[in-house]
């Protein structure tokens, strides 16, 4: 079985029995969105809330097939990995404006869940974890920066024995607790949004309808196997599943694989030992381990390979090894499911947003670099502003350069491995190793 086809915790615990037909026939719309993951559905919902409901969403497989249904469900602050990487594009004032958006993602998510009554198992509480003194110093800086945003949530630095207040392990030397973050059942969040889109706003959604060809012009035509959509504006929201249909976007990201696992249900007292706050966690290394407890008392644990890019032969065993480094007392715990999948990554490790060259009515968002659950909320709100005529923050984010990655189709694993090595070396000098 290909790694993209394995069942996930999310598909096994989905709460919404939603399905949508394939597109048959030729239809028209104001906006057509290609991609039924977070980017596509978030953007459609943002547009609908602004009165643009004549929108069509085309999903090649089923909603949440990509990264939306395979991630760790981490609700974190921020947008990209390292804002210094985009300094040359936006300058110091631009960096400040982008950092000011850091807390917006969790806020949008909370408001949306409340507004539409979405059952997505949202829970507050996030721990950023440090293994050593360099990383601890970075967390102390993050504490100052996060507090400077005026968050209404508790933000607290912990070190030494106090780390045990939030997590049951001795491997970390320090932690930054951020109660504005937390975790969510990402697939149920997506499906709850799709339910609101289709039932409240009458937005048309089609599954099993991959885009086969696009004809550009003042009105854009997207052809599928059994129909087409003609619209004034097009949005590409396919992230790691472009498959060369749009060459300009295909060239500027490269797929990196990440893997997750989930344990069998655990006794409440063991969950309490693992996570007194029943929260989500990640270390701050260039390639992070990330984990959380689920609302049904399991431990979900995920990561990517640290340097050499490869697909482990036994995902359960690979994830177990990482989990036991943090929680050695879980040696007798069974891993129920393990899965993996691609995530589109950019050279500067920052999401891409804008319009295609010479095509002002063709928009896109892609390249979340493994951090799409929360930043996609921010990015898609801003993308919708661009579609509706523009805004200062849309102009800022769309001004960030988008570079091609030569050789990505033939040397993906090698290029990703070299990129990870460079990222690890850079991380040492920036207090992340």
Image: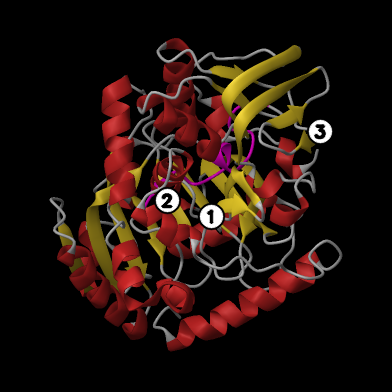
Q: Which residue is mark 2?
A: 375
The first of marks 1 and 3 along the sequence is: 3
Q: Is residue 85 visible?
A: yes
Quarter of the image with the N terminus is top right
Direction from residue 330 to residue 231 in the image, left or right: right
Q: Residue 316: image x %, image y %?
A: 64, 48
Above or below, 37 against 81 in this view is above
Q: CA distance from mark 2 to mark 1?
A: 8 Å
Locate residue 35: give its quadrant.
Answer: top right
Instruction: Kindly identify which residue carries mark 1.
Output: 368
Q: Which image quarter: residue 119?
A: top left
- 119 or 192: nearer the eye? 192
Answer whether residue 49 is magenta in the image: no
Query: Crowdedness of circle 2 by 10 Å Cα count: few (<14), some, many (20+)?
Result: many
The residue that disc 3 covers is 212
Q: Residue furthest bottom?
A: 429
Q: Position of residue 180 (x, y in %)?
A: 24, 50
């Amino acid at each position: 079985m290909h790694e993209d086809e394995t069942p996930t915790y999310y598909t096994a615990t989905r709460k919404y029995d939603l399905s949508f037909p394939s597109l048959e026939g030729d239809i028209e719309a104001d906006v057509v969105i290609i991609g039924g993951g977070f980017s596509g559905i978030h953007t459609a919902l943002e547009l609908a809330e602004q009165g643009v409901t004549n929108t069509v969403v085309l999903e090649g497989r089923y909603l949440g097939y990509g990264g939306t249904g395979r991630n760790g469900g981490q609700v974190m602050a921020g947008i990209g990995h390292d804002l210094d990487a985009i300094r040359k594009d936006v300058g110091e004032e631009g960096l400040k404006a982008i950092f000011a958006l850091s807390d917006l993602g969790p806020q949008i998510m909370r408001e949306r869940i409340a507004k539409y009554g979405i059952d997505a198992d949202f829970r507050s509480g996030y721990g950023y974890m440090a293994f050593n003194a360099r990383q601890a110093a970075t967390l102390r800086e993050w504490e100052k920066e996060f507090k400077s945003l005026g968050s209404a949530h508790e933000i607290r630095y912990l070190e030494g024995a106090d780390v045990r207040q939030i997590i049951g392990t001795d491997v970390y030397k320090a932690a930054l607790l951020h109660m504005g973050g937390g975790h969510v059942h990402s697939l149920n969040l997506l499906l709850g949004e799709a339910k609101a889109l289709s039932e409240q706003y009458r937005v048309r959604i089609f599954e099993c309808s991959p885009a086969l060809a696009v004809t550009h012009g003042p009105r854009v035509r997207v052809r599928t196997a059994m129909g087409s959509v003609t619209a004034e504006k097009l949005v590409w929201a396919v992230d790691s599943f472009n498959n060369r249909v749009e060459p300009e976007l295909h060239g500027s990201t490269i797929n990196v694989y990440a893997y997750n696992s989930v344990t069998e249900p655990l006794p409440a007292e063991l969950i309490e030992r693992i996570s007194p706050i029943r929260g989500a966690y990640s270390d701050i290394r260039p390639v992070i381990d990330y984990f959380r407890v689920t609302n049904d008392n399991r431990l979900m644990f995920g990561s990517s390979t640290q340097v050499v890019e490869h697909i482990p032969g036994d995902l359960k065993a690979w994830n177990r090894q990482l989990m036991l480094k943090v929680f050695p007392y879980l040696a007798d715990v069974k891993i129920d499911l393990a899965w993996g999948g691609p995530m589109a990554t950019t050279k500067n490790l920052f999401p891409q947003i804008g319009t295609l060259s010479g095509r002002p009515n063709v928009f896109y968002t892609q390249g979340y670099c493994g951090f799409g659950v929360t930043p996609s909320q921010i990015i898609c709100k801003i993308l919708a502003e661009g579609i509706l005529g523009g805004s200062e923050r849309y102009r800022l984010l769309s001004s960030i350069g988008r570079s091609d990655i030569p050789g990505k189709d033939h040397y993906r694993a090698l290029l990703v491995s070299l990129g990870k090595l460079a990222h690890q070396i850079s991380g040492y000098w920036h207090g992340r190793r």
